[in-house]
Image (cartoon, rainbow, N blue to C red):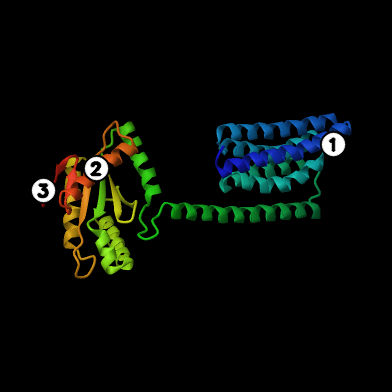
Amino acid sequence: MDSSPTRVMVIFTLLGAGAIGGFGVHRLLSAEYGIASFDFFVALSFLSLGYYTHKTGKDGLARFLSAAIAAVGPLVFIRAFDDSGLYWVYSSTIIIYYLVPYRWAMGFNAVMLISMSSIFWDTIDHGGQFYSFLVTIGLINGFSLMFALDEERSRMKLKALSIRDDLTNIGNRRAFSARILEIINKNKRYGLNACLVCIDIDKFKDTNDSLGHRAGDTAIKKLSSFITGMLRESDEVFRIGGDEFVIIAEGADQDSGTQLTEKIRQAVEEEEFIPGRPLTISLGASVLKDTDTPESWLSRADEQLYKAKSSGRNQVYFDGEIIPVNG
């Protein structure tokens, strides 16, 4: 169990088991054996979910079942014992929003409130007491939903930022790692063709040393935008280092990969990224093999890039062969 979410879930189940188990001990001492048994059953359920989370490192099932317990527990308590279970509805509403995504939480809470209303419909005071209950539970649901939505937006924003390169706004190394694994899995399932292209700016250190890092950053941003504009919708470019880019061309075989890489090389050579100063790139490419792992595929494409740079730069090596200029 490494991740923070699983640790938090284990702590939550321990706290839940401790709180409800405490009620169980009190009721056992008060000779309320039926209610005590129910309390101990719920506490044991929480402990079991915490143990499962600790052993597997997965908290999804524990969160879902804990939310179900929070929704159903007060209803069972009220139906089997007494109306004091009504007080648990308020805390359960908040807990459910914490445990599961807000759409599930809205469903759990709707079921709990509808069931609660059906239980009390014949006995509840339909005047001020009922109105107060509805307003209170409505406000709790509303504010809990607002916080859940804010948390969801923040989480999605952080996730998007975590896979984007700060300078170019294209995918970073983390996004590349996820995408290359996805492509390899597609190949194993469906026999999907794909081409991996490693790109390096030629003599980029000289550009930084002579013109400064600001000019270098500007060139990198322009180049990433330029390459992106040349790709198909199914292709994607990532920045995985200072002046290192990688393209994953989904569905491309060696013929289409050859055309793509030479087209990019030639177009970059003809474009002016830094006024009065030429900029060229070297490219190494490799077609995906059935036996490839992310590491082996990237390593092979990187070897092709090394060959392109060591044999003169501003050229493309594709699976051991140099692509003729304009070829």
What residue do we see at 79% from left, 33% from top? 80
Residue 324: mark: 3
Cα separation between marks 2 and 3: 18 Å
Q: Quadrant of residue 46?
A: top right
Q: Position of residue 295 (x, y in %)?
A: 33, 38
Name above or below for residue 259 compared with residue 218: above
Left or right: 276, with 181 as reference point: left
What residue does disc 2 label? 303
Which mark is in front, 2 or 3?
Answer: 2
Q: Earlier in the sequence, mark 1 or mark 2?
A: 1
Q: Position of residue 280 (x, y in %)?
A: 20, 58
What residue does disc 1 label? 26
Q: Badge 1, how many Cα within 10 Å: few under 14, some, many 20+?
A: few
Q: Give the structural element (helix, strand or loop) at label 2.
A: helix
Name the kind of residue labelled 2 in the image: Glu
Q: Earlier in the sequence, mark 3 or mark 1?
A: 1
